Image: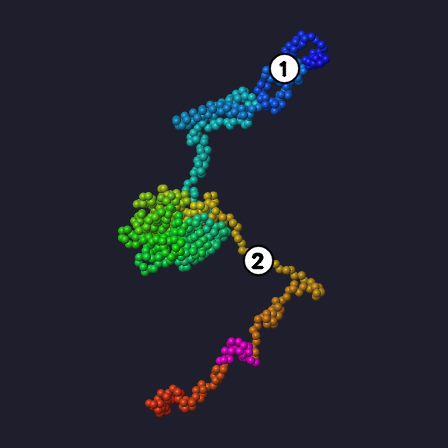
Amino acid sequence: MGDKEEQSKEDSEGGTEPGFGSFGSFNKKETDRNEITNLVNEEEKTEDSDFVDDVNPDIAKVMGFAGFSSTTHKKGTDKLTPKTKNTTAVPTKKAQQFDVDSMFAAVAKSAFEKNFDQNQKLEEEGRAELESDYVPRVGESSRTDKQSSSERASDNDNDSDGSDDSDIVGPAPPPPSNNTRKPNSRVEGDDDEDEDEEEGEGEREETPVDRIPHSHEVSLAHGDKAITSLALDPSGSRVISGGADYELKFWDFAGMDPSLRSFRKVKPCESHILNHLEYSTTGDKILVCAGNAQPKVLDRDGGNVMECLKGDQYVLDQTRNKGHTAVINSGNWHPKIKEEFLTCSQDATMRLWNLNDRGKKSKAVIKCKNRKSGLRAIPTSCTYSRDGLLVCGVCNDGSIQMWDHRKNFVNVCLQVEGAHTFGNEITGVAFAYDNRMLASRSNDGSLKLWDVRSFKKSVHTAEGLFSRFDQTDVLFSPDDKLVVTCTSKEKGEPGGKVVFYDRDTFKKSFEMIVGDSHCIRAEWHPKINQLLVGGGDGVVKVFYDPDRSIRGAKLCVVKKRTEAKTVNYITSQRIIVPYALPMFRNESSRQKSTWRQMEKARKDPLQSKNPMKPNLLKGTGGRVAKGGSTLASFMAKQLAVKNKDDHIDPREAILRHAKECEENPFWIDPAYKKTQPKPIFQEIDPDEPPEKLTRSDTFG
């Protein structure tokens, strides 16, 4: 029975009628089944060959593609799955899959191949133009442009015909450039565009003159007299100015409002003009060189830190002196050693000082001499090199002398005799930022530029720069391409000038008139890019550029002006209730007459502060306390006791002792007792009045 049931199941699964057949019929049915399976598989292969063969089996398993088909194709098997009961297969719609990486690679490759030929053509044309220097005409350029556009259009048409929509992924590649002519070539009709391009190029190329801050200015009013010294701290936040009025004023850009008032003023050297001021490299100390012989060092807020000792003016050898003996002309801080500074004086010496010595003695003494005559030369200005290895001094004999800071200061290492006119003071000297060039300014109206590497002759010279003051400055621009100096006001000129010279050619690049007075001092700060000019009218001009300058004067001009503090008084209102009961009236709110209040206060001795009335019974002229209760009364009582006979006539007071003198002589009679026992008196002349008689005539 079991074998029959299995046979019936197989017959039902194979699609045949159930029943008991022979074994020969079973083999025939099996061959028919295999033929039907092969036909179905061939039809499915032809329909799904474009997709099934390329599908990754893993992706198909994840996406569920295997469940959509009626049969599952496996290599090495030709059997139907149990799901296939019908002999014909129904075609099913399958999801489309894209390989993004391969598509991107294909698009990039096709774009490169499309543009490769055209780029090669452009490169060949440009190379040919560079070799032949050929400028195409308008028609030719237009034709080439049209031709290139037509070629691009045909390429695009071909691409659109030969490519499917599925190949285009992402935005289309940018079109190739049509500019086939040289960048500097000119074409007719393009003059306006070329001019615009030249103007744009001119704006991009910035010259040293364009960096000069002069478009905007503010004025710091120091006083009525000339500004003889000016300095900025290293950060550019504070300014100090000193003038011929002996005052040193402090200005703080961050703390000022548009009123531009200084926050402190001091007189560090009493009645001496301030010749030079300079901040230290750290900005916490100020060197003050005034018209006296003692340089001073102040702190940032004007407090006294150190005062150098004064030398003995009767000592001829200045190396034996501990300090200067004449007016200090200038000074300078060492750029590397923050405790050391340099000063020069009218005593023909330059001295190096150290803050650690507290000014009791100079560190080193440099004697300035004229090489030809051997006489002393007075240094009018001094400075260090940028690296601090050279000490430079300029003298009134027109010479520039330098010493090596690493050696003793006996002999000079560099010297130029007759650098400027003899007898005219060299008012300023400054090293360039590259430490190779040196600029010197003299009252002979000249400005000279020197090369330290070849220090025999000046590199450039500028003449006709008038100067009245011994403190006229010279300096270099922050970019080290300009040399700047000041000039005084001449007759017929509107005012002093600040002149800028090109360092390489020494041609006058720029000049500007500052105010209607002389220009004496100038400072160009490299960090804030602002130019400060001190004039002969006691005003410090601050020039800045809103675009190229930072901080400094820009901080205070934008602030709101501070107003004076107003005091508000709040008065209580008076409520007048005329018919209120006395217990409800507010007497304090009632307004009383000031005249009546004054009369009432006058009657009160405490409020009116009347003096106490004299006691008529016990004194005269005032009130006298009890005797002995005060020191004054005690002294008066003692004097009254001692001089109780003051009311007696002096003659009577003396004559009452006459009898006692005759009986017991003490002074005269004992002296003449042996030699002249009987006294002989002067005879009285009856013609003379008795008032002229002497005391000896009267008393013996």
Q: Residue at x 59, y 19 (%)?
A: 52
Q: Which residues are magenta?
A: 617-639
- 588 on left or right of 191: right
Name the residue located 50 percent from the left edge and 78 percent from the top edge. Answer: 635
Residue 34 sits in quarter: top right
Q: Is residue 634 magenta?
A: yes
Task: Tell me where residue 396 appears, x and y as whole percent.
Answer: 32, 52
Q: Give the foreground label among 1 and 2.
A: 1
Q: Which sits in the foreground, 593 or 191?
A: 593
Disc 1/disc 2 C-alpha distance (Å): 110 Å
Main secondary structure of the magenta stretch: loop
Identify the secondary structure beneath mark 2: loop
Per the image, the residue denoted by label 1 is: 79
- The amino acid type, in three-letter code, at marker 1 is Lys
What residue is shown at x 48% (from left), y 50% (from top)?
Answer: 253
At label 2, the amino acid type is: Val
For residue 567, the mark is 2
Quarter occupied by the N terminus: top right
The reply to whether dot 1 and dot 2 touch (C-beta < 8 Å) is no
> Which of marks 2 and 1 precedes in the sequence?
1
